[in-house]
Image (spheres, helix red, strand yellow):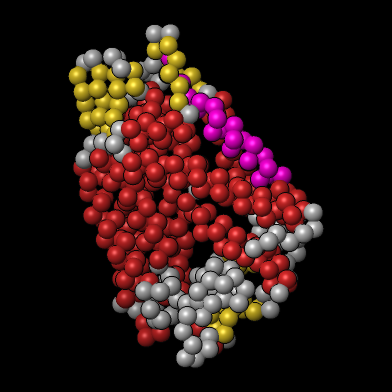
Amino acid sequence: MSESDVTASQLGLCTCHSCGGLSELLPGVHEMRCRRCGAALHLRKPNSIARTWAFLIAAYIMYVPANVLPIMKTGSLFGSQSDTIMSGVVYLWHSGSWHLAVVVFIASVVVPLAKMLCLTLLLISVQRGWAEHALERTKLYRVLEFVGPWSMLDVYVVTILVALVQLKSLATIQPGPAAAAFGAVVVLTMFAAMAFDPRMLWEPKEAHHV
Amino acid sequence: MLTACHECDLLQREPILPPGGVACCLRCNAVLFRDIPDSIDRGLAYTLGAAILFIVANIFPIVGLEVQGNLHATSLYGAVESIWDNDMQGVAALVFATTILIPAVEISLMLYVLLPLKFGRLPRELAPILRIVAAVRPWSMTQVFILGVLVALVKLAHLAHVVPGVALWAFGGLILLLTASGSTFNMHELWNLVTEKE
């Protein structure tokens, strides 16, 4: 960091998280609001570390039933069958659509897990006050924010299958409990990424305004 | 004019951008803001197109299954209902919010902002509206939904004869227009309008 690098917070300036405008923080005044848009002003996202951990741990917990429990149950003349996310991927692979199997595997299994592990890494790096690789860690955070919604894929697949395959005597598909758990994982990891404040990656541990 | 990077908090001067230019943070290279030529005219065109396709995509069936001469089709809302009826109210609410409610809110608020601006007037309550647009945007998941429909179709293709519905094509156009309107809706420029008004 060169000497000319001055952050807004070092000068007592606060960026509005809603409109991006700069406001001067007045000492001793609590609950300030942005002049331009009226949003509550915080130097950093409030309780960023604790809130990110809370969402993240909840997401880790929900990730287990999301993968272990069946995501849908197929009933037909030839008996019934339960599918987990992984068995659905295996099925796609064997039925010849290996490219879709790869897409579903990446969107449903790899992305949520990688997202949770990366956020864990970012949180630990902030809490331990790592000074190196701030740029790389910020880029990692940008990727996390971008991929967030894509893990909803399997929830939508199940929704369409359940709606279409209601052929009373021939075949029916019902959603399994993993669909709800999986939706929860996606929402919780998105909340976790939103609660994390990437500006903490750039400042020494003592300067955290959390 | 000073600005602080929203990702690393570096204080820097706002550059004057050439048409179509992008201002990036000097330290972390985050995109600070863009200059988007004709953002109101183009944004309005894309958003109006998106609004029309959104209505078509929600009225008509997305896909149908043909079994023994019977066609069983579903629309997006029908799919939400059938998940709800299968005792998955949470999932139904999530699908409803991310594919119907939030895209509808996003499109109508963008029209609410762009239409008056096109005729040279400043929309009322611009600041709270912009805050809502920014807050709901990450939860709008039409693109992911369409990928999900395609995966479901492949899974069903060998089970029965799959008939793509009108809404599937409308959704295809909708995701292109939504992406285009999202990238022409210039938050930075609109917030500057709020500042000028004061």
Return the x and y of residue B131 as percentages of the image width and height: 56, 62
Q: Residue furthest top?
A: B69
- Is A67 situated left or right of B133 in this image? left
**Residue farthest toward the right in the current orientation of the protein:** B120
Who is closer to the viewer here, B91 or B138? B91
> Magenta stretch: residue B177 in it?
no
Residue A5 seen = no
> Does residue A163 sit above or below B176 in this rendering?
above
At horizontal 31% and vertical 71% (from top left) the residue drawn is: A50
Chief SS of the magenta region:
helix
- Residues A26 and B13: in front is A26
Name the residue: 60% across, 45% down. Answer: B178
Percent position of residue B194, x then y: 68, 68
Residue at point 45%, 22% (across, down): B73
Say if A6 sits above or below B59 in the image: below
Q: x%, y% of residue A208?
A: 39, 81
Query: Magenta segment range?
Result: B45-66
State whether residue B42 appears in this view.
yes
- Residue A41 x, y percent position in the rendering: 50, 76
Please, is residue A90 above or below residue A23 in the view?
A: above
Quarter in which the C terminus of chain A is drawn: bottom left
Identify the residue shown where x is 36% and y is 74%.
A47
